[in-house]
Image (spheres, rainbow, N blue to C red):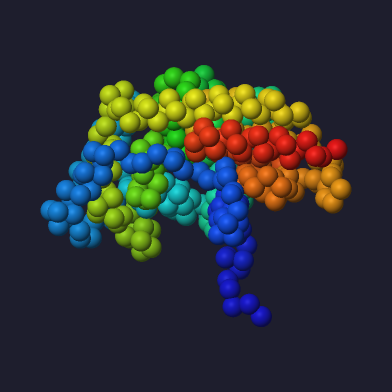
Amino acid sequence: MSALSERIKNISESATLEMTRKSRELKSQGKNVINLSIGEPDFNTPENIKDAAKEAINANQTHYTPVSGILELRKAIAEKLKNDNQLDFTYQQVVVSNGAKQSIANALLCLVNPGDEVIVPAPFWVSYPEMVKLAEGKFVEIKSTIKTEFKITPDQLEAAITPKTKIFMINSPNNPSGTVYNREDLEGLAKVLEKHKHVYIISDEIYEYINYSGKHESIAQFPGIKDRVIVVNGVSKGFAMTGWRIGYMAAPLDIAQACDTLQGQITSGASSISQLASLRAVRTVPATSKELNEMIAKFKERRDLVLEKLKSIPGILPNNPDGAFYVFPNVSHYFGKSNDTETIRNDVDFCFYLLDKALVALVPGSAFGNPNCVRISYATSNENLEEALNRMKKALADLS
């Protein structure tokens, strides 16, 4: 009889972490695996941000921090939201956490009661459903397709809302599709949500800066719902600071205070050194950041390379992402095809076939709510991308 709780037995390992682990195992055996499953920039943290961390260490700023974060950082985040996003939050409404993932988990655990419904457009980040399970909520997904650029419509949202709906969660730019909701898209959803006063909104904006379509738009900008929106962001993606583990939320005051209470009993405040480095990042003016703009330009170049290569593979139908660093192509053309020894039945088989035959690691789309697709991360060099996609094309040509 297992001693493990039902809570932990009911959640699944992250598919992205699973594929990363399997690719590392093959690499440890000396195999030349190209990992296109990982969700982090392959760039280094900008020098001025690293300098801020060194200065903090030398100044012995190495002690416990307030649970909600260092006051100076919380004030800087409120200023950033005002200057960059035209959103009015006070520093008292800001909570700094150990990554944006903790910020989302905090919000869910503070809002969701057993049986409450959390609506999320599919495709969605792999951790969303598992976090809802931990909060004992019911995960409700709204399907989208490549034909709609993986966007949902206001009518779909309206149809999904019930008296039990507690939260609508949106992620733009989106992981895994790279889809970016523009102002018009968000306004349509906001008009629906304005009618349903019992529904809170979590807006995951962690990929804000990796946006090729123009100005980032937040659903928190609309007056009719702004008092029910929890904005989640952080420094990991935009400033190549994944290992520093700093995310934050800006929320209605009572929710921010509740998250402070929860976090105080689980992790307390985030690393003092990471927070002081993040202060330098948050104060960065995006338009003047050479490193940020070079990174975005490089990601766009890689996106175009990947799309060009994918279009040369028969049967692959890629989307055209406007943000993040992923492509989410439909690969269902290969379901049912086989070589002499194995048959591709679904997206999982497709990924394991490519890992085995081409030594290329992808993530099955079923982990993100769309089993017809796979996620390809282009957070790696042009040379790796060219080689990986050439290998994929060759391996898939053996199927019939």
Q: Is 315 left or right of 44, judged from the image as shown?
A: right
- Residue 83 in view here: no
So how many labels did they put on this image?
Answer: 0
Q: Which residue lies furthest to the left in this view?
A: 59
Res. 384 in view: yes
242 or 23, which lies in front? 23
Of the pair 45 and 132, the residue shown nearer to us = 45
On the image, the x and y values in percent for residue 204 come to 46, 39
Residue farthest toward the front in the current orientation of the protein: 30
Q: Residue at x 25, y 34 (%)?
A: 283
Residue under the point 28% across and 24% down:
288
Q: Looking at the image, which residue is at 82% across and 40% down? A: 399
Percent from the top left, x then y, of residue 93?
31, 42
Please, which residue is most extreme toward the bottom here? 1
Quarter holding residue 159: top right
Q: Nearer the viewer, residue 36 or 391?
A: 391
Residue in the picture at 36% in, 44% down: 241
* Residue 132 placement (x, y as % from top left): 56, 52
Residue 68 drawn at (x, y percent) = 29, 51
Q: In this view, does 271 lie to the left or right of 390?
A: left
In the rendered image, the quadrant that contains the C terminus is top right
Image quadrant containing the N terminus: bottom right
